[in-house]
Each structure stands twice: as structure tokens, then as C-alpha cells.
Image (tube, rainbow, N blue to C red):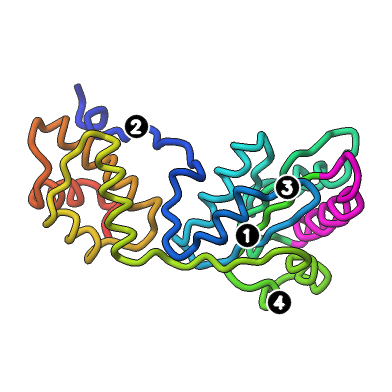
């Protein structure tokens, strides 16, 4: 078995609402979970706050569409204009990075959402970005629409919440995570929960491949071999 095969990371579990550590964001998570057709919700928060997790989880649970700033604008435009295609939920992430064509498409999607809100064709619209709607670097009419319905700020998890999330992730994998390893990760690694979760998964894989228990030296050895996940 090659070194590369030994260190391959298994695909992470698909994001779910139940798998989101809410911390101080209980109201926001509840609003996402109960978002109904005809309503819109905008989430904002910094990198690593978990807003993308919430959008992906909601789109998956509702058999909806998830798009972000990397999605070709014509895909978003098609959702906005093809009224023969029924929609349940559309989630548009990273709206702060949308180019001009994508902003125009999202504007059209908001107009479709509003026109259908009180009809049998109503769908839910979930959007997210890195700042409050009125401070977005977007066209003025789109900034206004982002604040048409509910708006929630996603707060970063506390260290206690992050620690519990990592313990839970390790427990799911049957991994014993010593306190000194957990403390080192929280102090020296970044605060992005997606990256932290990926690190736990990789640490589990590395431990199994080396037939060694998880220890702080093993973690540092792993990070030395994988510069892409170094803090």
C-alpha cells in the first residue's frame, strides 16, 4: 500500500442540520430548519462560521438547489427564469462574491420568489454572505432584496462549543481524542469547523494506517507530512 493511499481521507459526512453545532445560533438554526415556501432567509457571518454548512444541509434535506459564487451564472439564471421547472428551495451562498451576471440572475430569482410567494408555486429562498445586507458590495436593488425577509448573523462558536464538536466527531469515528491533543488543535489550528473536522478525520486515518494511538506527537507528525492542513 503506497504512502498516498495510506493517507487518503475518506469523504466527510454530508452536512446535516442535526450535525450543526449551534452554540449561540439556536434561533438562526431553527429558522433555517423551519423555512417554508414563500419565505426567504439571509445568513451572514465570517469565514468558518458555518453558514455554508447550513445552506448545504437545508438544500439537501429539501431536495433543493445549492449554488455559490463559483457556480456559472447561467445556472442561477435558469432557475430564475424557467417557470416550467418547479422549485422547492434555492440556496445561494457567498453572495458577496457574485459577479455582475450572477447578481443579475439572483435579482431575477428574488423577483420570481416574490411573485410566487402566495401561490402554489411558492418556494423558499436561502441566501448567505460575509456581512450584513446593506453593507454588501452588490448592486443596490439586490442589497435591498437580501433584507426583504428574515436576517440572522451567524456567530463564531466559542472554544467550548468547538471542543465539544470535535469530541463528538471523534466519538462518531470511534476515536479516543486525548485532552492534550484537543487543546493543541484548539490553540494552534484555525477556527474553521470544516477544516477542524477534516483534521480529525485525517488524524483517525493516519492513526489506523500507522497502527498507533492518537497522541500529540502523532498529530504533529501528521501535520508535518501534510502542509496543506497546517495552521
Mark 4 vs mark 3, CA separation in Å: 24 Å
Which numbered dot is residue 82? none
The residues bearing labels 3 and 2 have C-alpha atoms spaced at a distance of 34 Å
Q: Name the residue at 87% across, 55% down.
A: 114
Badge 4: residue crowd in 10 Å (few <14, some 14–19, many ≥20): some
Query: Are dots 1 and 2 in contact, CB under 8 Å?
Result: no
- Above or below for 6 versus 98: above
Location of the N terminus (image quadrant) = top left
Residue position for label 4: 134
Tell me which label, 3 or 1, sits earlier in the chain: 3
Q: Please, what is the dominant secondary structure of the magenta stretch?
A: helix
Task: Specify the segment rendered in magenta.
Answer: 100-122
The residue pinned by badge 3 equals 36
**Location of residue 23 (image quadrant):** bottom left
Task: Return the x and y of residue 48 as percentages of the image width and height.
Answer: 44, 60
Percent x, y for residue 162?
32, 58
Mark 1 and mark 2 lie on one chain; the one further toward the N terminus is 2
Which is closer to the viewer, label 3 or label 2? 3
Q: Position of residue 74 (x, y in %)?
A: 78, 45
Query: Of the numbered discs in the image, which one, if any, rests on residue 10?
Result: 2
Which disc number belongs to residue 128? 1
* Mark positioned earlier in the residue sequence (2 or 4): 2
Name which quarter of the figure residue 202 lies in.
Answer: top left
**Was residue 61 drawn as part of the magenta stretch in this picture?**
no
Residue 105 belongs to the span the image colors magenta:
yes
Q: Secondary structure at mark 1?
A: strand
SS at mark 4?
helix
> What kind of element bears circle 2?
loop
Q: Marks 2 and 4, Cα distance to the nearest angstrom?
A: 40 Å
Q: Is residue 54 left or right of residue 218?
A: right
Amino acid at each position: 500500500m503506497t504512502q498516498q493511499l495510506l493517507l487518503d481521507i475518506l469523504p466527510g459526512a454530508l452536512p446535516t442540520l442535526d450535525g450543526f453545532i449551534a452554540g449561540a445560533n439556536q434561533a438562526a438554526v431553527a429558522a433555517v430548519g423551519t423555512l417554508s415556501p414563500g419565505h426567504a432567509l439571509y445568513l451572514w457571518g465570517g469565514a468558518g462560521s458555518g453558514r455554508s454548512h447550513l445552506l448545504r444541509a437545508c438544500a439537501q434535506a429539501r431536495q433543493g438547489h445549492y449554488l455559490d459564487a463559483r457556480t456559472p451564472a447561467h445556472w442561477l439564471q435558469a432557475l430564475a427564469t424557467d417557470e416550467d421547472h418547479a422549485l422547492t428551495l434555492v440556496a445561494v451562498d457567498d453572495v458577496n462574491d457574485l459577479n455582475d451576471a450572477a447578481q443579475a440572475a439572483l435579482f431575477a430569482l428574488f423577483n420570481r420568489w416574490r411573485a410566487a410567494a402566495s401561490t402554489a408555486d411558492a418556494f423558499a429562498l436561502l441566501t448567505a454572505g460575509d456581512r450584513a445586507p446593506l453593507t454588501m458590495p452588490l448592486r443596490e436593488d439586490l442589497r435591498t432584496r437580501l433584507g426583504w425577509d428574515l436576517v440572522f448573523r451567524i456567530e463564531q462558536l466559542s472554544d467550548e462549543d468547538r471542543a465539544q464538536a470535535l469530541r463528538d466527531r471523534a466519538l462518531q469515528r470511534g476515536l479516543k481524542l486525548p485532552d492534550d491533543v484537543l487543546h493543541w488543535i484548539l490553540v494552534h489550528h484555525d477556527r474553521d469547523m470544516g477544516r477542524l473536522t477534516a483534521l480529525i478525520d485525517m488524524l483517525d486515518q493516519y492513526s489506523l494506517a500507522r497502527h498507533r494511538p492518537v497522541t500529540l506527537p502523532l498529530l504533529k507528525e501528521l501535520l508535518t507530512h501534510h502542509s496543506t492542513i497546517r495552521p
